[in-house]
Amino acid sequence: MLLVHYRHETPVLANPIKLIHVDEDLVVLDKPCSLPVHPCGRYRHNTVVFILAKEYNLKNLRTIHRLDRLTSGLLLFGRSPKKARQMEHQIRNRLVQKEYVCRVEGEFPDEIIECKEPIEVVSYKIGVCKVSPKGKDCNTIFQKLGYNGKTSIVLCKPKTGRMHQIRVHLQYLGYPVVNDPLYNHEVFGPMKGKGGDLGGKSDEELVRDLIHIHNAENWLGMDGDSELSMFNPRKADLDDSLVGPLVPKDRVLGDDDADPVSREPSPCDESCDNNSSIPCESSPHPLALSSLTTSRNVDAKVTVATQTGHEAPDFSFNPDKMTVDKHCYECKVRYRDPKPQDLVMYLHAWKYRGPGWEFETELPDWARVDWVDPDISE
């Protein structure tokens, strides 16, 4: 008996994975947005671990921490169990300082903001959180780096590692990430969740509405007699006025932005000690004043070829390899093909520092203070 399996892969951006540091213990990379770290849902080959294994011959990697699919930036893997446990221990015990940058709506306050609002998981099934007194203690420090007249660049320093912590705290403060498809959405009420105001919705109503929006905005329906499918062009690809901001399925099934991978209870799940110091005055951050310097652990000459001994092969689209099965349910489902801007979120993991080590990435173009989003500019 022969079993044949084939899968429907979800589109991702073609941005390459940038290797920052590779040695016998660690692989450090700059993850592009739109790629999940591990296979999940309809993602398999278009994942970080699959691409590293297939194109760069970096296999059997141990995940140290995770990033959400739409979050770009620094990602660390262990190449040995010992190193992975060591790094995970440092993260659990809050020996690692993390810095993210994001672009948020409006003019963020000039002073340093510390948000300690507890965060509760509303639904583990779809992966959505909110600020709630019943949640776990959280602590994030925010500092404005610049303002371009419409949006602000903000430096984020999470002191704890809750699910979607940075995004939920920014939503609560009223400065959501500009293109956050989940937490910058009116499904959270007219105030979009600012100050915890969900427009009177219960948790059940919020989850129901999120699922409804996901189905309405991403599925075009199913027609068993039609040859239209997710692979074929559709008339006008839907009018933009009929399709709101994208809330992808694998976005709401997001990973934690900061916690180590282990599902076991850990000190990282407990309250953060109140012994961290915060500057009394807001001073200009180096990012807002000058070009970025490269981390001492980042070798500008590192390439895929120098680390693996070969250039990454060209895996361009080959229509001859595409198969349509008349008995496959997913072949008959017409999905909305995401636009490139749907696969980007302006949240980037910039720097990680621990005992005796430090890594950082280059920043994306949108992180320049004077950058203007062409999709929202007049």
Image (cartoon, rainbow, N blue to C red):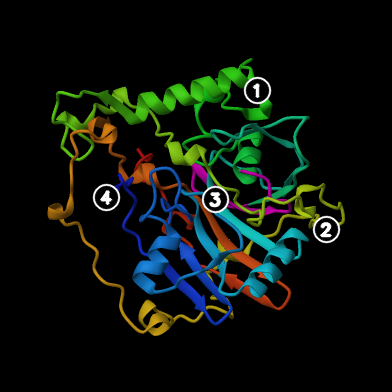
Q: Is residue 179 visible?
A: no
Give the residue at mark 2: 277
On the image, which quarter does residue 212 sit in?
top left
Query: How far apart, in angstroms, are the residues tagged by discs 4 and 3?
Result: 49 Å
Q: Are marks 1 and 4 in contact (CB under 8 Å)?
A: no
How many residues crowd around disc 1 within 10 Å: few (fewer than 14), some, or many (20 or more)?
some
Instruction: Return the x and y of residue 323 as percentages of the image width and height.
Output: 18, 46
Secondary element at tag 3? strand
Marked residue nearer the N-terminal end (1 or 3): 3
Instruction: Between residue 87 and residue 21, name the one nearer to us.
Output: 87
Closer to the camera: disc 1 or disc 2? Answer: 1
Instruction: Between residue 169 and residue 219, name the one nearer to us.
Output: 219
- From the viewer's perspective, is residue 56 above or below residue 189? below
What's drawn in magenta, residue-wise? 144-163
Q: Are marks 3 and 2 in contact (CB under 8 Å)?
A: no
> Which amino acid type is shown beneath numbered disc 1?
Asp
Closer to the camera: disc 4 or disc 3? Answer: 4
Secondary element at tag 4? loop
